[in-house]
Image (cartoon, rainbow, N blue to C red):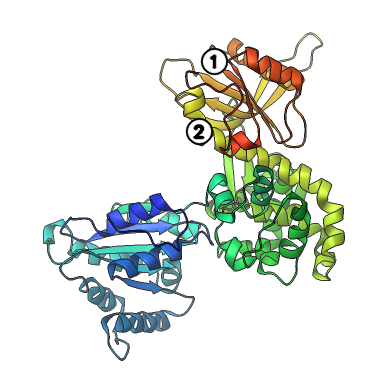
Amino acid sequence: MVVKPAYISHRTQEWASLTEFATGTQPEVAFGVVSGRRRQGKTYLLRALAEELGGFYFEATEGTDIELLRLFGMALGRHTGSPVGLPFADWRDALTFMFSLPGERPTPLVIDEFPYLMKANPALPSILKQEIDLRGRTHRGTSNARVLICGSALSVMGKVLSGQAPLRGRARLELVVQPLTFREAAEFWGIADPRLAALVHSIVGGTPAYRDEFVASDVPRSLEDFDSWVVRTVLNRERPLFREGRYLLAEEADIRDPALYHSVLSAIATGHHTWGRIAGHIGYKSSDIAHPLHVLEDCGLVTKERDAFQSTSTCYRISEPIIAFYQAIMRPEWAALTTGHAEQVWDRARERFSSAIMGPHFETLCREFASRHGEELFGAVGEVASGTVTEPGGRGRKERRIQVDVAVLSPAFANEPRAVRSLGEAKWGKVMGLRHLDRLRQAKDLLEAKGYDTGDTVLTCYSGNGFDDELKAVAQEDPQVLLVDLPALYGTTQPSCYSKER
């Protein structure tokens, strides 16, 4: 077992996957792909892996093909102890030499930011594929290299192994380094107060780099310090985090018209989540935003989520909290912020922050909670999503629509009714009461009439501001009513009326 270095926080599973791959006992070459959004710590992991196992690490940069080949040769020269860079004729020559590096034991050979190399030389994946095949199972013993390529450009990395791509079918490891979970992020930032942890997470999410590299380890000391922290870090024009919401979009090579993409993101950040509403908000036809939405999905900046109960309905959400915060809070006030009026802007934006950022983000945290911990609470989980339950109108009655923030469904089996494990409503700034529970009961009745199995459905109220006494009393008596407050969400207490026998 290769011990994870102490300076790498969390990432236990990722480290285990990488070390298992890099130290595998198969006698032939092995190939793996590591990807993930920017700032997630991929480079930390791969550098550490190479250092711990005596492997080779090369990080590409933007440049011409000839220049990158020269830099690659210099890196290999340093690795082999050569006083000068190795002069390779072409990339085939360079990769042949690289594959010859490993000795008696498997050794990781890491090429980071591989998309930069692909941009300079589109034939490189084909060359790499041929070199891997030359040392595959039919030529065991010629190399036991453990080759890893890595990249942050998700739209590019997603194509490396897809369709007819040359490297398709060659990878033995496909590792996506995700942001830290909201509980891991709270621990990483050293925030014990769950309310403060949720507020901070709504801005910086689970991106590790933001704590040390972007705010110089400036962590809000308490709830009372949160407003001041926002002003002195996120809204501070002298801090790197200030422009991060703009730079994350600018770094994506597939984005040709930044103004259009900013408008699409702004629409989503301000509550326009469906295709039609996004198009209407920015003044475009629905057909005209198909391409930008697909690009934003491919880049990992936007996710498309299916409605739990309306199979043809989808909604779009921004994946990176700092982008949502920039679009909803900073972009409308950019002129004031760039002239140093952060405090005044934040005074005006607090209410908008609560409604446009914190409310939707709390719903996202609750869905993540149900996804990660739902099985012990509700039984086998197949899907967690928001959903719309409708009752058709008729005879003078309007159609009734009930929005369910956290719908937990069982795995889907053929010829069996889908079981609704839980229906949940999430409120960040309100004390929840019986009226919220009644809405969930109505949704449950409507779903039962539509053929769903609701016999064991748990009605779950998620609140960032607590529950009134009447709702608490009902939850005490009814085992199918569950209350989840912030301490329960963050795992410091159990959900109210939670039982292992549920």
Looking at the rendered structure, the kind of residue marked 1 is: Tyr
Q: How crowded is mark 2: few (under 14 residues within 10 Å), some or many (20 or more)?
A: some
Element at label 1: loop
- From the image, tell me which residue sits under label 1: 452
x 79%, y 17%: residue: 398
Q: Position of residue 401 (x, y in %)?
A: 72, 22
Q: Position of residue 116 (x, y in %)?
A: 45, 71
Q: Quadrant of residue 170?
A: bottom left
Q: Where is residue 92 in the image (x, y as percent from the top left)?
A: 27, 75
- Which label is found at residue 440? none
Q: In which quarter of the image is residue 3?
A: bottom left
x 74%, y 49%: residue: 223
x 82%, y 11%: residue: 396
Residue 420's place in the image compared with 40, above or below, is above
Q: How crowded is mark 1: few (under 14 residues within 10 Å), some or many (20 or more)?
A: some
x 73%, y 52%: residue: 266
Residue 348's place in the image compared with 256, above or below, is above
**Quadrant including the N terminus:** bottom left
Between 233 and 413, which is closer to the camera in this rendering? 233
Q: Nearer the viewer, mark 1 or mark 2?
A: 2
- Which label is found at residue 373? 2
Does the image show residue 256?
A: no
Distance between the alpha carbons at the discs numbered 1 and 2: 22 Å
Between 330 and 157, which is closer to the camera in this rendering? 330
